[in-house]
Every structure is written in C-alpha cells, then in structure tokens.
C-alpha cells in the first residue's frame, strides 16, 4: 500500500492507501526482487506483455477467495 498522486487537468489528486496490482507480474532479477520484498517494496517487478499496473483504492479492494495451494500460505 502507498500514497499516490495523480495529476488531472493540472491539478494534483492525492490518493491514499493505493494498492498496485497486476495478475501477471514478472521480474528479470529475482534476487533484487526478493530483497525488495523483504523491505515491503517491489523494485524490479513489472507487468507482463508491456501492460500497466492497475491501481485500486485499499478501501475498495474486493475480498479474495482462498487459493488453496498446498505448501503455500494464503496471502493477507
């Protein structure tokens, strides 16, 4: 989650509690990404196929269904 400022018609609109999301994010440097994730960042991650991240307001993030993957904890 982070704060994000969007400029529309020359005016800044600050959005708080924004979540960046993409269903197919990739990295080319897994060690850099792992180190970044340990600090709560996602440096080195980008959406696949030249797409863009999606931004969601934290207060509007839909509830997720459990993934049910054996050996992997459910995300929070």
Image: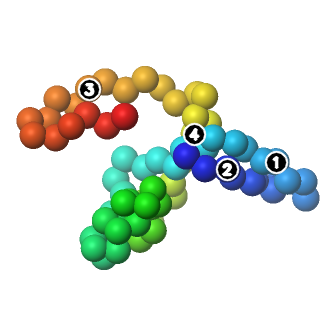
Q: How many residues crowd around disc 3 within 10 Å: few (fewer than 14), some, or many (20 or more)?
A: few
Between tags 2 and 1, which lies in front?
A: 2
Q: How many residues crowd around disc 4 within 10 Å: few (fewer than 14), some, or many (20 or more)?
A: some
Which part of the image, by quadrant, shows the C terminus? Answer: top left
Q: Is residue 44 above or below residue 10?
A: below
Say which residue label 4 marks.
56
Which of the 4 image quarters holds residue 59? top right
Between tags 2 and 4, which lies in front?
A: 2
Residue 45 in sight = no
Q: Which comes before the other along the chain, label 2 or label 3?
A: 2
Q: Which comes before the other along the chain, label 2 or label 4?
A: 2
| Nearer the observer, 66 or 52 | 66
Say which residue label 1 marks.
13
Left or right of residue 68: residue 16: right
Left or right of residue 62: residue 57: right
Q: How many residues crowd around disc 2 within 10 Å: few (fewer than 14), some, or many (20 or more)?
A: few
Say which residue label 2 marks.
3
Residue 21 in sight = yes
In terms of secondary structure, where does tag 3 sit? loop
Say which residue label 3 marks.
66
Q: Residue at x 67, y 50 (%)?
A: 3
Distance between the Cα atoms at labels 2 and 3?
A: 27 Å
Distance between the Cα atoms at labels 2 and 4?
A: 11 Å
Q: Which percent across, then down, holds residue 60?
A: 58, 28
């Amino acid at each position: 989650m982070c704060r994000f400022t969007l400029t529309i018609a020359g005016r800044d609109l600050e959005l708080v509690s924004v979540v960046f999301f993409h269903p197919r994010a990739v990295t080319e440097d897994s060690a850099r990404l792992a180190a970044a994730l340990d600090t709560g960042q996602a440096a080195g991650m980008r959406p696949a196929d030249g797409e863009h991240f999606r931004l969601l307001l934290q207060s509007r993030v839909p509830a997720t269904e459990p993934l049910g993957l054996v050996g992997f904890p459910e995300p929070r």
